[in-house]
Image (cartoon, rainbow, N blue to C red):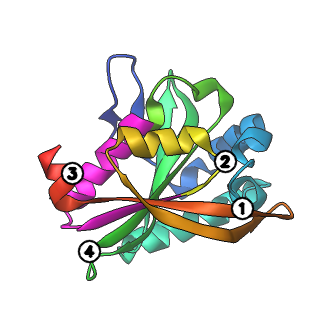
Amino acid sequence: MYAISLGDDGAQLRPLEPWQADELLAHMDRGRDFIGRYIGLPDRVTDLASSRAFLIDYAEKAATDTARIYGIWLDGTLLGGVLFRTMNIEQGTAEAGCWLEPAGIGKGLVTRATRVIIDWAVRERGVHRVEWQVAAENEASIAVARRLGMTRDGVLRESYLHKGKRHDIEIWSVLAREWQQA
């Protein structure tokens, strides 16, 4: 398996694969409440079987070139991840996303990892537009979009129901020409 260095601190970006289901579950258990504030991932990964099923689903999507998922490791511990939740190579679009447990906060891990996957999508796969959807209250994720040079396209008002509450979702994006110029 390959690993991509994310900098001098030893952080690595690697594919997150079905055989790592136990590691993903342990990671979710450490950060479940924090990770689940704005996204439903911890609700999907609740035991070893659901963790494996989640990763198999992404492995199948990677095989059909419609999504990708990567883990972020620091000092040998899975602390978070980035993904292309959707990819439509024919249309040249992809939706990137992320999650992180508390131990990974403040290290720039998500920004560095997302930069790697966007660069790959634009330069290697010919993706024209990468989108970032984020709950309007999720200031940390919005800060990542800004650091990546994304533009706020708009708000989908009360479009996401999560934990019984409707959230506004901000749509951010970067186009290939903007990415390459930066």
Cβ–Cβ under 8 Å for marks 3 and 4: no
Residues 82 and 146: in front is 146
Cβ–Cβ under 8 Å for marks 1 and 2: yes
> Disc 1 designates what residue?
167
Between disc 1 and disc 2, whose residue precedes?
A: 2
For the N terminus, give its image quadrant: top left
As drawn, is 136 to the left or to the right of 142?
A: right
Give coordinates of residue 125: x percent, y percent.
Answer: 21, 65
Query: Residue at 58% across / 34% down in the picture?
Result: 79
Between disc 2 and disc 3, whose residue precedes?
A: 2
Give the farthest residue toward the right. 164
Q: Mark 1 to mark 4: distance in Å?
A: 28 Å
As drawn, is 25 to the left or to the right of 180?
A: right
Q: Mark 2 to mark 3: distance in Å?
A: 26 Å
Q: Secondary structure at mark 2?
A: loop
The amino acid type, in three-letter code, at marker 2 is: Glu
Q: Residues within 10 Å of mark 3 (few under 14, many from 20)?
A: some
> Disc 3 designates what residue?
179
Q: Which residues are magenta?
A: 111-133
Image: 24 above or below 58: above
The amino acid type, in three-letter code, at marker 3 is: Trp
> Disc 2 designates what residue?
137
Query: Residue at 84% across / 60% down in the picture?
Result: 163
Residue 14 showing in the rendered view: no
Between disc 1 and disc 3, whose residue precedes?
A: 1
The amino acid type, in three-letter code, at marker 4 is: Gly
Q: Secondary structure at mark 4?
A: loop
Between disc 1 and disc 4, whose residue precedes?
A: 4
